[in-house]
Image (tube, rainbow, N blue to C red):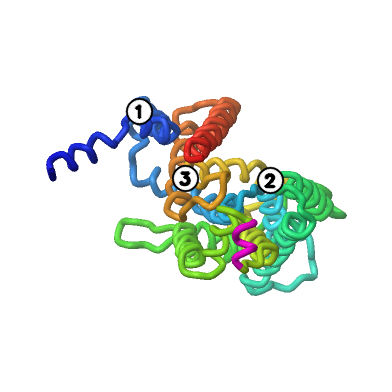
Amino acid sequence: MKTQSLSKKKSSFNVKEWATNNAIQIVLVFLLIGIIFIEPSFLSIKNLTNILSQASTRMIIALGVGGIIVTQGTDLSAGRIIGLAAVVSASLLQATDYAYRMYPSLPELPLFVPILIAMLICGFMGAINGFAVAKLKTPPFIATMGTMLLAYGVTSLYFDRPPYGAQPIAGLAKNFKELASGAIEIGTFRLPYLIIYAIIACVIMWLVWNKTKLGKNMFAIGGNPEAAEVSGVNVARNLIIIYVIAGLLYGLAGSLEAARVGSATNNTGFMYEMDAIAACVVGGVSFAGGVGSIGGIITGVLIFQVLNYGLSFIGVSTYLQFIIKGVIIIAAVALDTRKYMKKK
């Protein structure tokens, strides 16, 4: 009898179904193998460190987007809100001896103050999204598209400032740039600060998702909003909080991105939301709602960043990279929808 039950368990594994459900991950792995085959030097500690550093801000963004997707939403405004954070934080953290300061008479501010201001502004933008979705019952796609335009307009007005006009906000303070470019030296190994920030953000969001009432409510709302409301969950309040948290994460990511690049413009963060959404879906966060994990988001972001870096490393055209990303996003969402329909 035991032998029969074991054979049944073994036969229950369907290779075809597994391959279909994980098709995107399999394709990405083969793409990575192809990149390594074309350029074996891609596998180096330096490249790995660069990939993880570049993935760090994208990871923070994806943590915010992932929570929204779990609730059956989406956020098209993330990239433009990141740009707003980058421009605000950079303008307040220019070196005092820089000739083209936006605020010439502004004294040197403590590092955390401009970053906190940027995060609060972005949190407010997230609250607008959350209010539109939760209270005004606007579809997330439309609500966040409106906020995307709003954020870009505000950023551009702020960026195109007199007397210098629309030129990159540069000349950033040394301690601000060090915030992103610095690292902890461990023997011959260099651990960038950006990776540490991403790890801390992941740990905090893992605790929020798995150990708090908000996390429990988030999955309940994503699984069935009506049932969650009947069970006593304040759906509107929880949705607004989730969008606000996403906004705060965008604010932090935008500030770090400005520090990493060394300047900011009104186009900083452009299309970052697409990478975040794709990474979340590749990492198993379902648009059907109620399904996702922090570990999956981390995996999705790393896979996507390795692909991005690898394609650039072997000299693939940026325009072709857009095409590849677009195909991956369409395929990932289509496969996710297929899995959900099969379950129903």
In depth, the one of 122 and 226 nearer the eye is 226
Residue range highlighted in magenta: 226-231
Residue kind at label 2, given as amino acid type: Leu
Look at the magenta stretch and give its main secondary structure.
helix
Q: Which of marks 2 and 1 is nearer the N terminus?
A: 1
Q: Earlier in the sequence, mark 2 or mark 3?
A: 2
Residue that mark 2 sits on: 76
Disc 2 + disc 1, Cβ < 8 Å = no
Residue that mark 3 sits on: 284
Q: Position of residue 204 (x, y in %)?
A: 49, 66
Point out the residue furthest to the front here: 1
- Residue drawn at point x = 12 percent, y = 41 percent: 3
Q: Is residue 308 within the magenta segment?
A: no
Q: Position of residue 308 (x, y in %)?
A: 50, 37
Q: In which quarter of the image is residue 254?
A: bottom right
- The disc at residue 16 is 1
Residue kind at label 1, given as amino acid type: Lys
Quadrant for the N terminus in the image: top left
* Mark 3 crowdedness (10 Å alpha carbons): few <14, some 14-19, many ≥20: many
Disc 2 + disc 3, Cβ < 8 Å = no
In depth, the one of 118 and 226 nearer the eye is 226
Residue kind at label 3, given as amino acid type: Gly
* Mark 2 crowdedness (10 Å alpha carbons): few <14, some 14-19, many ≥20: many
Secondary structure beneath dot 2 equals loop
